[in-house]
Image (cartoon, grey):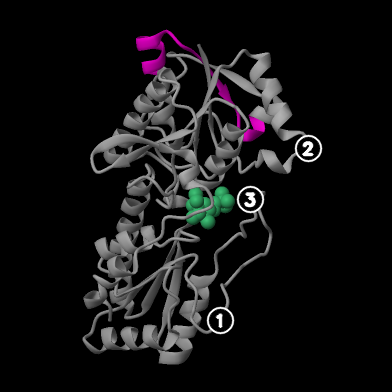
Amino acid sequence: MKIAVLTGGGDCPGLNAVIRSVVRKGVHDYGYEFLGLRDGWLGALQDNVVPLDTSSVRGILPRGGTILGSSRTNPFKHEDGVRRIRDTLAAHQIDALIVIGGEDTLGAATELSRQGINLVGVPKTIDNDVPGTDYTFGFDTAVSIATEAIDRLHTTAESHMRTLVVEVMGRHSGWIALHAGVAGGANVILVPERPFDVDQVCDWVKSRFKINYAPIVVAAEGAVPMEGQMILKDRSLDEYGHVHLSGIGEWLAQEIAARTGTDARTTVLGYVQRGGTPTAFDRWLATRFGLHAVDAVKDGAFGTMVALHGTEIVRVPLDGARGRTKVVDPSLYDEFAVFFG
Ligand code: F6P
């Protein structure tokens, strides 16, 4: 059996841990052969493959990023995309694919699976927004990085008695904002799922100043004010139709300063949240996903995705993840209302 592995979408810590785990188990337990497809679906379209064996995955467990490269290529946006993928698979006698990706990459995988390509999905993303799994790997690392940043911003904010707005990733879901905001003791947490009232945010900021503390406002990049539109820096779209976000933090700091007459600054954490070594939890989860993905291929469980349910790794239908985003439940968000202001 020959299996190809690809990593698609935004990179995240733990991708290499999955690749290592897949190859180690597949070679050792089942005698499978492996190939890597470079840069997500692009490698499948362009027949760009690299050898993958136990020696090529040695030492990669703690390394961030992906040794296979990644891209946001959507095979259905390329002429003859499906045929070209079939040609690549046939040229290398590939029997099955292990597709490591988020909503978009797995969405394309779902359609390709429907069209008869044997594949198994592995959910990844720092955003933790893939439905069907309790957690994706990469999320814990991003939350840890954002929490450390918030801890550091508290002390500088207090020294200057100013508001610090921290913009974190999360275009459709506020998981990073909520977890890091709670862990870092933020005074305001803004998520895309709950349009916010700028006046309310300013009231929280003022009440924080009143007790002589400097406010920390954590905003997901996709957070939107009630009365307006999403704040966008540019309007370019990727191949999955997503706009490039960022700008809410800057806008909010300006509004807070203007409306409260106090000093406010912004820190945009950006790609720092995605880079570097994965936490122990993410290495653990990614390793388990890899082991179970190989078993799914061995069992011929194509069209499924490995997922975490509680402490168990299970298989769920890939199409369950299609076109949906796992968002923050309003009641979970409301649990933390006591910490706002
Ligand atoms: O990986 C998902 C994500 O982190 C989103 O939160 C963010 O909007 C996006 O990636 C930005 O990534 P890129 O600029 O690589 O498209």
Q: Amino acid at mark 1?
A: Gly
Pick the front one: 148 or 336: 336
Q: Residue furthest right?
A: 79
Pick the front one: 203 or 326: 326
Name the image quarter holding the C terminus: bottom left
Residue 228: mark in rendering: 1
Q: Looking at the picture, how far across and down is residue 123, in whole percent? A: 43, 40
Mark 2 / mark 1, whichever is N-terminal: 2
Q: CA distance from mark 1 to mark 3?
A: 24 Å
Answer with the quarter of the image where residue 199 lies: bottom left
Res. 275 visible in picture:
yes
Q: Looking at the picture, how far across and down is residue 197, in whole percent? A: 43, 84
What is the crowding at mark 2: few (fewer than 14 residues within 10 Å), some, or many (at least 20)?
few
Q: Looking at the picture, how far across and down is residue 32, in whole percent? A: 46, 11
Res. 59 visible in picture:
no
In the picture, measured across the screen, residue 112 lies left or right of residue 77, that is left
In the picture, measured across the screen, residue 257 lies left or right of residue 41, that is left
Answer with the quarter of the image where residue 114 lies: top right
Up-down relation of residue 98 to residue 324 (above or below):
above
Say if mark 2 contacts mark 1, CB within 8 Å: no
Q: Magenta stretch?
A: 24-43
Residue found 37% across the figure and 48% down from its top: 139
Say if mark 1 contacts mark 3, CB within 8 Å: no
Q: Which residue is mark 3?
A: 240
Q: Which residue is mark 2?
A: 79
Residue found 40% across the figure and 29% down from its top: 18
In the picture, measured across the screen, residue 222 lies left or right of residue 114, that is left
